[in-house]
Image: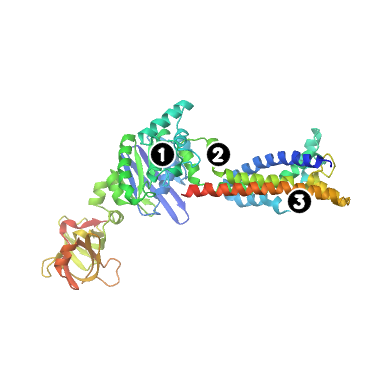
């Protein structure tokens, strides 16, 4: 069995997960403080979660295609996104982003606002408050969101096939390999990949449950 | 003046209009819950932004809407003791204090040790906030504030999160701590006893408005306004009309009262404390004939609700509350009717 889909899946999901983590946490923090436009931003940033992945892929093509807004610039700089691993990373990031964003936002909103105010009156820098008070106070929720987003990035299919295609050895991830195997009537290969995906997903969900338990314990402590 | 506050803010139908100044020592903002006390503190600390006005601390402008000044909380040097202390739950007591201290890592560590020792927290530095009692948490919060070197201390209902049997001891400790701190402290409370024991000056707040600060003694022994008298624990009020130099009509009680001192022209209400209302003989001069409305047995005293014979029907204030020792009430053998008198020197004239 050719293992390249497994390797490519992780080559895509790890950078996509990291990107999603940073962007999602940043966006959630910014929107929590956005005041009046909060609802609008919230809707826009959650949109990729409810749109069909193919629609997300279509928009990504519009943006990153050779004639697209960003794609044109990148193309002139000698970088191509369409039909490359970078494209798969972008697609996985776009689709997994709302999961991270929503989890982080929920965690930020549960944090006692007075802790932040206390930090400010004590003269702590905003960055110190964020990294030493807000993030530790929110980490179980944020870590759970990151895990969920990573699992989603790992299994991404729709937007990836639109933007990065299904090129064996280059952009063919495990979920794309399943589709190809079924289309080529190779049931044995398809069930191999299905088993691998099931195993990874199960482990992820198990870790998620442990994290949620930790979060409940942390909240219980705070209220006692 | 150490602190000068003159701010306005609207929140829905609530209007905050706080104007006061004080020179040092400990001052209280006293008022019922929801009157805007905590909001005022939050404006001073820079957590909430007022719509207009100014806040000055030791001559430094913290906020001035006219000049467009609004210092961030970090630059105000205002220590804020939150109602539930707001200790960082992910840090030990020592780390909570260390993070607020300035200087190198070693200096911060040393300062934290000093502050913990000063607040009798030796040996508790490695505990997390949830492993400390309410009083210990409060001391950690104070140590943390002192480590940050504030110019003023704001205390938001510092005893509300404590069990009542602990309160008196922690109150004494806090009183000591405040005098050692030696800088001005502004204290928010709805508990008149707390305020009387801890504060030199009191600023009464009602429905978002402040009254001019007065000394705590004067507020409680001789309140000038209806709000102040209510907060000082006075229970009997009547609308009043001045009839003469030393004669006033109590409209809600349907009687005229002779007073010891001259009745001020602007008197709108009079008040009398429940333990100052005394039983009298029906024929005595100044006796007010009453019907006994209800008798409540308190722990050490008896509270009697009386309806004066001349009281207009349907008034909110038509009842007089008299409190007297249990034995004295039993000795009266009052059955349904009782005459009382209100000594002239115990009548408070209120605006």
Q: Quadrant of residue B1?
A: top left
Q: How many marks?
A: 3
Q: Which mark is residue A30?
A: none
* Label 2 environment density (alpha carbons within 10 Å; few <14, some 14–19, many ≥20): some
Q: In what quadrant of the picture does the C terminus of chain B appear?
A: bottom left
- Is label 1 in contact with label 2 (beta carbons under 8 Å)? no
Q: Which residue corresponds to mark 1?
A: B140
Q: Which residue corresponds to mark 2?
A: A130
In 3D space, how far apart are the residues under numbered discs 3 and 1 (Cα atoms)? Answer: 52 Å
Colour theme: rainbow
Left or right: B328 with respect to A43? left
3 vs 1, front mark: 1
Residue B36 visible in the shown view:
yes
Image coordinates of residue B339 in percent, x first then y, are 16, 68
Front in this rendered view, residue B337 or B135: B135
Image coordinates of residue B138 in percent, x first then y, are 39, 42
Image coordinates of residue B20 in percent, x first then y, are 35, 44
Chain of the residue on which disc 1 is drawn:
B
Q: Which mark is residue A53?
A: 3
The residue depicted at 61 percent of the width and 44 percent of the height is A142
The residue depicted at 24 percent of the width and 47 percent of the height is B217
In 3D space, how far apart are the residues under numbered discs 2 and 3 (Cα atoms)? Answer: 33 Å
**Local SS, label 1:** helix
Chain of the residue on which disc 2 is drawn:
A
Left or right: B284 with respect to B220? left
- Whether callout 2 and callout 3 share a subunit is answered yes
**Local SS, label 2:** helix
**Local SS, label 3:** helix
Q: Residue furthest right?
A: A184
Q: Is residue B87 above or below residue B149?
A: below
- Is label 3 in contact with label 1 (beta carbons under 8 Å)? no
Left or right: A220 with respect to B234? right
């Amino acid at each position: 069995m050719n293992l390249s889909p497994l390797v490519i899946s992780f080559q895509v999901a790890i950078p996509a997960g990291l990107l999603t983590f940073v962007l999602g946490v940043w966006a959630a923090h910014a929107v929590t403080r956005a005041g009046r436009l909060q609802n609008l931003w919230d809707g826009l940033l959650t949109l990729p979660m409810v749109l069909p992945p193919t629609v997300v892929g279509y928009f990504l093509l519009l943006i990153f295609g050779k004639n697209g807004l960003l794609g044109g610039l990148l193309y002139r700089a000698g970088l191509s996104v369409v039909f490359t691993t970078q494209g798969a990373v972008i697609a996985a990031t776009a689709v997994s982003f709302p999961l991270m964003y929503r989890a982080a936002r929920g965690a930020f909103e549960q944090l006692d606002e007075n802790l932040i105010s206390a930090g400010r009156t004590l003269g702590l820098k905003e960055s110190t408050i964020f990294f030493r008070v807000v993030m530790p106070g929110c980490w179980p929720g944020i870590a759970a969101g990151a895990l969920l987003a990573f699992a989603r990035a790992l299994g991404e299919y729709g937007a990836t096939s639109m933007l990065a295609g299904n090129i064996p050895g280059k952009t063919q991830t495990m979920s794309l390999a399943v589709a190809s195997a079924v289309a080529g009537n190779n049931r044995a290969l398809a069930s191999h990949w299905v088993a691998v995906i099931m195993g990874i997903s199960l482990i992820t969900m198990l870790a998620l449950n442990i994290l949620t338990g930790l979060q409940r314990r942390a909240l219980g402590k705070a209220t006692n | 003046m150490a602190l000068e506050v003159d701010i306005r803010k609207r929140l829905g139908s609530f209007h905050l209009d706080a104007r006061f100044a004080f020179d040092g020592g400990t001052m209280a903002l006293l008022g019922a819950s929801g009157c805007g006390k905590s909001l005022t503190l939050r404006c001073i600390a820079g957590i909430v932004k007022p719509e207009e006005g100014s806040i000055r601390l030791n001559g430094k402008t913290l906020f001035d809407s006219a000049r467009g000044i609004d210092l961030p909380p970090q630059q105000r040097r205002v220590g804020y003791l939150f109602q539930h202390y707001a200790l960082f739950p992910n840090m030990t007591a020592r780390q909570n204090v260390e993070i607020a201290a300035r200087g190198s890592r070693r200096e911060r560590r040393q300062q934290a040790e000093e502050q913990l020792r000063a607040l009798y927290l030796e040996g508790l530095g490695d505990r997390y906030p949830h492993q400390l009692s309410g009083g210990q948490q409060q001391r950690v919060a104070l140590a943390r504030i002192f480590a940050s070197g504030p110019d003023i201390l704001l205390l938001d209902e510092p005893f509300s999160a404590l069990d009542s049997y602990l309160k008196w001891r922690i109150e004494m400790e806090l009183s000591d701590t405040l005098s050692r701190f030696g800088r001005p402290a502004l204290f928010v409370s709805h508990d008149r006893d707390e305020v009387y024991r801890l504060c030199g000056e009191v600023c009464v707040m009602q429905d978002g408005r402040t009254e001019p600060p007065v000394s705590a003694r004067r507020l409680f022994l001789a309140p000038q306004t209806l709000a102040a008298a209510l907060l000082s624990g006075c229970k009997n009020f009547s609308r009043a009309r001045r009839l003469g130099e030393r004669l006033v009509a109590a409209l809600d009680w349907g009687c005229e009262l002779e007073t010891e001192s001259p009745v001020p022209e602007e008197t709108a209400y009079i008040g009398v404390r429940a333990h100052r209302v005394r039983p009298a003989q029906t024929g005595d001069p100044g006796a007010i004939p009453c019907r006994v409305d209800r008798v409540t047995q308190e722990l050490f005293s008896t509270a009697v609700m009386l309806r004066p014979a001349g009281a207009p029907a349907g008034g909110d204030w038509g009842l007089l509350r008299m409190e007297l020792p249990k034995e004295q009430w039993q000795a009266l053998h009052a059955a349904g009717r009782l005459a009382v008198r209100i000594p002239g020197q115990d009548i408070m004239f209120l605006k």
